[in-house]
Amino acid sequence: MAQVRVRFAPSPTGFLHVGGARTALFNWLFARRAGGKFVLRIEDTDRERSKPEFEEGIIRDLQWLGLDWDEGPSLGGPLGPYRQTERASLYRDQLKKLTSAGNAYYCFCTHKELEAERASAVEAGKSYRYSGKCRKLSPAESEEKRKSGLPFSVRLRVAEGATTFSDIIRGQVTVEHAEIDDFILVRSGGEPTYNFVVTIDDALMKISHVIRGDDHLSNTPKQILIYKALGLSLPLFAHIPLILGEDRTPLSKRHGASAVGEFKRQGYLPEALLNYLALLGWSLDGKTELFSKDDLIKKFSLDRVVKSAACFSYEKLQWLNGHYIREADEERVYQLCLEYLWDADAINEDFMREGGPALKRMIGTVKNSLKTISDVGDQITYFLGEVHSYDAEAFAKYLVPETIPILEKVVLVLEDTVAFSAMSLEEKFREVSKETGKKFAEFVHPMRLAITGRAASPNLFELIEILGKGRCLVRCLRFIQMIKAELSKGESVKTPAPPAE
Ligand code: GLU
C-alpha cells in the first residue's frame, strides 16, 4: 500500500475544541503507528471568520498535547503550501480542468432567483435543490454572459445515479444523487467552497486516509464526485462519532470547558487530556483506561473506533488527571502550581520572599490529592493566608468548654518545642497524650481545626512544621479566644442579666 499520509485540517475560526483535538489525535496515532506522515493544513478560506490568533492558538494547543506534525505551515514540506489561502493558483488550475471538460459549469442565477427557487420548494414542502437552470446553457451562451460581466458561480455537473463508498468506521454508505444538486465549487465573489478545496488539497497532498468527524459524512459523497470528475484517485474515509455531553446533546460550552486551552488553564495535564480523548470513541478491550502516548501508538487502530456517539465525562477526565498528577514528578507539579497561583494572584513577590521556600513543601503535601492543578489554591488556603473560616460541623463539635484546656496545652507544647520538626512534634504530642490520659486524636483534631480551619488535611505535624511556630501559635490562641467569646455569648443568652434595681 502507498505510504500512510493523514491530515488534520482545522479552520482557524475558533480555538481548538475537544472534538478537533480528538480528530487530530486519531490522525496522529494512525500515522505514528503506521510510520506514515501527519500533515497539518490550515483551512482558512473563510477569510472573514479566520483569524491569525486562532491559528496560533490551535498550533499552541496541538504542541501542548504533544501532537507533532511532519508537514505544515511554517514547517513546510514537499506538497505545500499548507495554508489554503496560499493555494489559490492550484485551485484555479483544477477548476479550469473541470470547466474545460464540461464537468463544471458557470451559473449566472442571481441571489434573488435562487431565493425564489428555495422559497417555492419550501412552500411545496420539498427540500431545496438547485433547478439546474444554467446547466442547460450552451458553451457559447455561457461564454457570452461571462464576457458581458455578469457575476457567476461555478457548479459541479452531477450526473444521475448514486455514490457509494465504504467508510472504515461506518461501513457502506450510499447517497442518491437526487439528494445532491449541482453544488457550488466557487462562489460568485471568487471564493472557493470547502468541498472543492478540501478535495483538491487531499488529492494533491496525497492523503491516503481522511479521518474526520461524523459531521462531515454528508460532504464525502460530494467530494467523491469531485475526485471522479477530475480523475483523481480516492483516499479511504473514516468518520469518527460525535462527542456528546452527559445530557446526550453535542458537547458545547453549556456543558463546561470544551476548548483545549480552557482545560489547560483549569490545570489539566496534557497526558491526561490526551489519554481521555483517546477513550472518546475508541477502546482497546472495553476495560483498559490508562494509556501513555507510547501505549496508544502501539495499540490504536481504526477498527476499534465505535460507531455510536461518545459521551464526555468531566468526572472521568478529573479522575485521570488526578492519576497523572500523582504520577508526575514533584518539581513539575510545583512549577505548574506556582504558575497557576501567580496567574490567580494568590501569591506575589512579597509572599515568595517570605513563604517561598515553604511553598514547595506545602504543595508536596497536597500533590496526591489534587484532581486539577487549580485545586491547589483551595487546598492550601491556610498556608497562603490567614484562616478566616472554620469547617462548620467541626466548629460546632469543638465549641465546648473542654476544648479550651486542650488547646491551652497545645499552645504550651508548641511554645516549648525547640526542634520544631514534624517528627519531634508528633512524638511530643504522643507523650502528652500518655501523660494526660487523653487520646492523641483529642489533641490532633481541634489543633487541626484551629490551624487550618479544616476537619481534614494532610499530615498535621508536617503542616505545623511548614507553617512555623509563630503562625501556629497565633492561630491556636485566636481560636481559644473565639471559643471563649462564643461560649460566653451562649452563657449570656442562657442566663439573662438580672433586672436593673
Ligand atoms: N476544516 C474542516 C473543519 O474545521 C475540516 C475539514 C475536513 O476534515 O475535511 O471542520
Image (tube, rainbow, N blue to C red):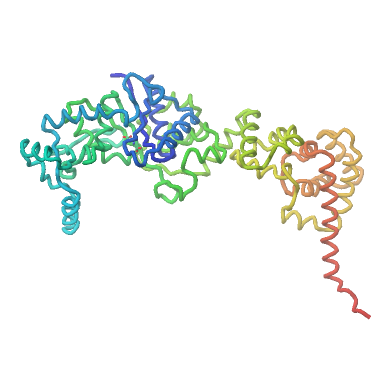
x 34%, y 34%: residue: 43
The answer to whether residue 191 is left or right of residue 136 is right
Task: State the residue at coordinates (17%, 26%).
Answer: 231
User: Which residue sits furthest right?
Assistant: 501
Question: Where residue 268 sits: x, y (%)?
Answer: 55, 37
* Placement of the C terminus among the 4 image quadrants: bottom right
Residue 232, position in %: x, y?
20, 26
Tell me: residue 336, above or below residue 125.
Answer: above
Residue closest to the eye, 201 or 33: 201
Q: Nearer the viewer, residue 468 or 175?
A: 468
Determine which quarter of the picture holds residue 393.
bottom right
Could you say where residue 397 lies in the image, as x and y percent from the top left? 77, 56
Tell me the quadrant of the picture where the N terminus can be found: top left
Q: Quadrant of ligand 1?
A: top left
Towards the viewer: 159 or 15? 15
Whole-percent x and y of residue 250? Answer: 39, 47
Q: Visible in this render: residue 18? A: yes
For residue 150, side relative to residue 11 (left or right): left
Q: Residue furthest bottom?
A: 501
